[in-house]
Amino acid sequence: MTDPELGFRLLVEKFQSSMYWHIRRMVVSHEDAEDVLQETFMKIFRHLDDFRAESSLSTWIYRIATNESIRFLNRRKEFAVSTEEVQEELMNKLMASEYVDYENEMEVKFQRAILTLPEKQRLVFNLRYYDELKYEEISRITDTKVETLKANYYFAKEKIKEYMTNN
């Protein structure tokens, strides 16, 4: 095995789990997450020489995974009539998943609440809440101003609270 192959293998081992869950929270289904994860690592492999260390390696990888997830969701939107249809499809996938503990009603309700968020708010919420990233890092991943991210996160939290209270 050559040094680049070994390096890439180590990179995959280090980031595979965190990227899987980041992608999974965006696309919902296990099968779709696996497909997007594979596309993500293929893109990373093809463009590893392009990494210029202007940000951390993890930020660069998150950005690729995020873009691949959004690209996947946008392909779904091409066949949907409305955003509500896309959200309904994601809800159906959540409820059909064998990886969800349906005994925990609050967790299922929480996941459903997250899926009602607009895509940008859902992305920011997931990166901040689950991945515990700082706004500055999310800013580099999403190419969005920190103030805008803080507003998106605030509105996402408020919408989730409202959903949890009223549904």
Image (cartoon, rainbow, N blue to C red):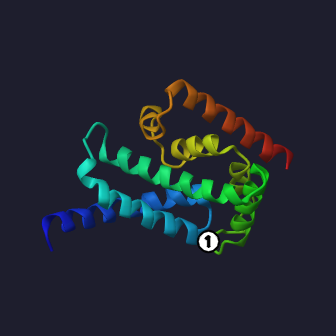
Within the image, what quadrant is residue 54 found in?
top left
* Residue name at image x 56 percent, y 72 percent: 31
Q: Position of residue 23 (x, y in %)?
A: 52, 58
Is 138 drawn above or below residue 38 in the view shown?
A: above
Residue lying at the far left of the rendered structure: 2
Is 101 drawn above or below residue 156 in the view shown?
A: below
Q: Position of residue 11 (x, y in %)?
A: 29, 60
* Residue name at image x 19 percent, y 67 percent: 6
Residue lying at the far front of the rendered structure: 78
Seen in the image, is 143 located left or right of residue 106?
left
Residue lying at the far right of the rendered structure: 166
Identify residue type, mark 1: Tyr
Q: Position of residue 153 (x, y in %)?
A: 61, 35
Are there few (<14), some (14-19), or many (20+) residues within 10 Å of tag 1?
Answer: few
* Residue name at image x 58 percent, y 55 percent: 26
Circle 1 SS class: loop
Nearer-the-camera pick, 30 or 63: 63
On-image quarter of the N terminus: bottom left
Within the image, what quadrant is residue 13 found in?
bottom left
Is 72 drawn above or below residue 58 in the view shown?
A: below
Nearer-the-camera pick, 107 or 79: 79
Q: Position of residue 93 (x, y in %)?
A: 70, 67
Q: Which residue is mark 1?
A: 99
